[in-house]
Amino acid sequence: MKKILFCSFVACLPSLLFAQSKFAQLDQELPTPNGYRTAGGAPGSDYYQQKADYKIAISIDDKTQVLSGEETITYTNNSPDKLEYLWLQLDQNIYSLDSDSKLIEVEKMEDFKSIGDVKKKLFHYDGGFKVESITTTSGQKMSYAINKTMMRINLDKALMPKGSISFKIKWWYNINDRMAVGGRSGYEYFEKDDNYLYTIAQFFPRMCVYDDVEGWQNKQFLGKGEFTLPFGDYEVSITVPSDHIIRATGVLQNPNNVLTAEQKKRFEQAKTADSPVMIVTQAEAEQKEKNKEKGTKTWTFKATNVRDFAFASSRKFIWDAMNVKVGANNIMAMSYYPKEGNPLWERYSTKLVAHTIKTYSKYTIDYTYPVAISVHSKWIGMEYPMICFNGGRPEEDGTYSEDTKYGMWGVIIHEVGHNFFPMIINSDERQWSWMDEGLNTFVQYLTEQEWERGYPSRRGPAHMIADYMRGDKKYISPIMTNSESIFQFGNNAYGKPATALNILRETIMGRELFDYAFKMYCERWKFKHPTPADFFRTMEDASAVDLDWFWRGWFYGSDNVDISMDNVKWFQMNTMNPEVEKAIKKEQYENRDKGISEIRDVDAIKQTVNEADPSIDDFYAKRDVFLVDALDKKEYEEFMNKLSPEDKKLLNSNKQFYELSFTNKGGLVMPLIIEVTFVDNTTQVFRIPAEIWRMYEEKVSKVLILDKEAKSFRLDPFLETADTDLNNNSWPANVEPTRYELFQQKKMNENPMQRQKRVEEIKN
């Protein structure tokens, strides 16, 4: 730091500039407010949404893995528009032989490195819907057309506002083997005991959303953009082998027909239990695996005001449950899992469900559904109303790695959390994945931290997104990109928006303002269809914080945060006291940096001319410029007599002035968080809002007036802005160390639990 003296303050007014693009308001990007959606981000007085009610009867053939079904849909048109046709989703058609999702994959020969790669490419599975008939409730055929994953029903007579229509669909399809085909839904076959575990969703033709934003939301399903659905009431009957245990969206309607007396007794106990109660034990499930019953049973479930329906079925299921109290609601937290999930699942799953429901309710809205269910299936993590399918499987010997444990914890919290986003706060997943995945991942992070102190969350903290944001911009999409067009889906739809919200909460808005605004958004849009504009506007409207610059930078752009601290200049106030100031100047002169010539001339020049001839030196040569004379003292006394007591105090306060210069190298403006370390090793933190960049987007400077002498300065000391280069954040420069791996670490063949078993064997 260069220490510079100055004798007076100089005010410098910058030339007036118009607001730069980074701080331009989002008016042009956001839709114009109207009667449906207000400028404050709330549903308007004319807001409407459609209703789709379903009565469904399905069966699963456990020998052929075929699902057959019939449904009656009652669709109510609450819009002000007349509808000449209806659109339904046929998501299972993604597994049709001519599916676009297969045709549009970008491939290279280098992708085919083994016989397995070739076999996977040549593997044919016809899993699309086989629609057998569509009729009116009186049995008359209806005209329809199937366009890949969408189906249009042509109405003989337009459906008028406030009108409703009922119709029937009959269909079947081949359930997909998730181990071979993948997918969000399907079955897993357990060869050792010759049993199946079904996790079934997207199994029926479902109504598309019709709203004031998109009209019909009938974008094709290509695999990434998930499901946008209207709310409605469901009654679903499911016929499966008689020894299967089923759990589904909603409440079981016929427990007397499908549960044993002992199971019903245990279930009643679970309704008041504050820890999991075993309803089907592992021993009981294993017995059913070995002794398969013949015949079938039909389970019936009802669900009110939900946007979808899913279920799981298997004779392998262990089942436990407990009560969770949220506000005035008693909720049954339940888990279903095969023995292959233990000991992890019996120990943790239902407790994680309960914790997630309580924590999300604190940060969003009270959970109002009667049940929350976690089902174990290998690999998959997928969500539906009241039920989700989650991975996290131990080794066959019952041991597991920490990665497996934390992976299981994280996926259960995440998928159960999806009950809030988008099952209740029902955003358009087909268009904006981040509105459910990003918001959910953010609250997942909060929930993980309340589960275990120091929980190693994968997403949320700002510094964890830095690697992604510093990457090649060719492969980084703005968050506000259609779900099917995103590079690096996990980082874009999950990680970056979750990080952005965490930064808003911790750094931009503060927890109190953020939490209030976030809950307001959730309350406004529960059981409704919000858009990005509704979220952006509500967060500003409820907090009085102008966030347009933040949405523009983080959600509409792909710039990264890289703010460098370029220079620090040190100033001290001139006390005007000649004894003080001349002593300082003398010290500076004596300690000045000497040039090489001056240093060498001390010995090289034995005697100068003026040293040999004293007559050479005149007044100036003999004058002591650091001497305090009588006139200096008189002038200082006269100066001090003119000052007020306040001015005298300030003049002698020994304030230290530091001018810090910054460059915005990454392009994404952010606040300046500056930590000062003083010579006595104490610290002080200054937080300067991002608006410091509003007139000058590339370079800014700031003067800090300190009471003590500073030793060093550090930018973003708490890693809260996602700065992608920490090596330019310190003054004096402080290079951040990185580890250079000379040798690739070998993958362990055993997890730490297995290793400990061998340790115990040696001891014994």
Image (tube, grey):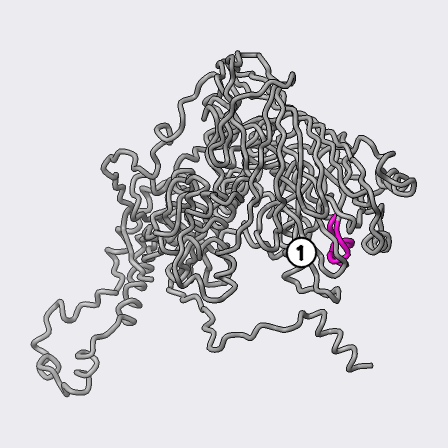
Vertical relation: 350 (above or below) 763? above
Is residue 573 visible in the rendered image? The answer is no
Q: On the picture, is 618 further left or further right than 574?
A: left
From the image, tell me which residue sits under label 1: 392
713 with respect to 142 (left or right): left
* Count of marks placed on residues: 1
Q: Position of residue 723 (x, y in %)?
A: 42, 54
Residue sitting at x 51%, y 29%? 151
Segment tinted magenta in the rendering: 337-351
Specify whether residue 350 is painted magenta: yes
Where, by quadrant of the figure, is residue 610 drawn? bottom left
Query: Which three-letter amino acid code belongs to the residue tagged 1?
Result: Gly
At 72% from the left and 71% from the top, the residue drawn is 754
Q: Position of residue 453 (x, y in %)?
A: 66, 54
Q: Nearer the viewer, residue 618 or 548?
A: 548
Q: Nearer the viewer, residue 752 or 148?
A: 148
> Picture quarter containing residue 513?
top right
x and y percentages locating residue 40 in the rendered image: 48, 24
Quadrant assignment for the C terminus: bottom right
Secondary structure under tag 1 reads loop
Q: Position of residue 747 (x, y in %)?
A: 58, 72
Would you say residue 380 is visible in this rendering? Answer: yes
Please tell me whether the stretch drawn in magenta is mainly helix, strand or loop. helix
Q: In what quadrant of the picture does the N terminus appear?
A: bottom left
Is 638 left or right of 33, judged from the image as shown?
Answer: left
Magenta segment includes 101: no
Closer to the camera in the image, 439 or 185: 185
Point 28% across, 62% down: residue: 582
